[in-house]
Image (cartoon, grey):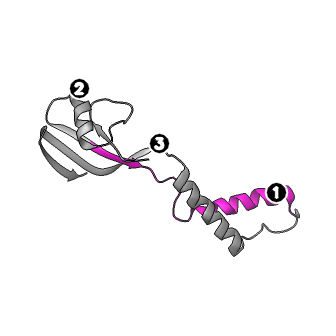
Amino acid sequence: MENKFYGDNGQEILTATDWEEALEEALENGAEYPIRIYEYKPKEIFGKNYYKNFLENFLEDLDQEYADPDADFTKPTEKMLEAAKCFIDIMREEYINFWLEKTGVVREYQDKNNYIEMKE
């Protein structure tokens, strides 16, 4: 999913795909200058080492169903870790995430052609 842009004009759904489109939407919805436009990006859905937690939880579920009840939980092998990392990497690439978070970049438009870009 690509970055989205939002003019502080009460929209509930972010649809603009660039700064200018967001400014046009804000103006169409009755906003007056100065207008602030905020950049958003898709929120990262898996942390850096998420695959380790994923694999540990998966193995724990397997052990509860199929392992010796008196044995310790199964420890992940290198091959298991590699497979879990590969799976999570593919999910990161293929899964379409619609949750967005602010990038911290804001443009305050004084008029259509003049703006100040700043970090929040």
Q: Earlier in the sequence, mark 2 or mark 3?
A: 2
Q: On the picture, is 64 further left or further right than 118?
A: right
Q: Earlier in the sequence, mark 1 or mark 2?
A: 2
Which residue type does callout 3 highlight? Answer: Phe
Magenta segment, which residues?
Answer: 38-67
Question: Which residue is painted at 68% across and 75% down in the image?
Answer: 78
Q: Secondary structure at mark 1?
A: helix
Q: Examine the rendering and report whether any part of residue 86 can be seen.
A: yes
Q: Is residue 10 above or below residue 79?
A: above
Mark 3 or 1, closer to the camera: 3
Q: On the picture, is 99 further left or further right than 110?
A: right
Which residue type does callout 1 highlight? Answer: Gln
Q: Which residue is mark 3?
A: 98
Mark 3 surroundings: few (<14), some (14-19) or many (≥20) residues within 10 A: few
What numbered label is drawn on residue 64? 1
Q: Secondary structure at mark 2?
A: helix
Q: Which residue is mark 2?
A: 28
Mark 1 surroundings: few (<14), some (14-19) or many (≥20) residues within 10 A: few
Q: Determine whether label 2 and label 3 are within 8 Å by CB.
A: no
What numbered label is drawn on residue 52? none
Residue that lies at the very extreme toward the bottom in this rendered image? 78
Mark 1 or 2, closer to the camera: 2
Residue 22 locus on image (x, y percent): 27, 37
Q: Is residue 12 above or below residue 84?
A: above
Q: On the picture, is 5 further left or further right than 54?
A: left
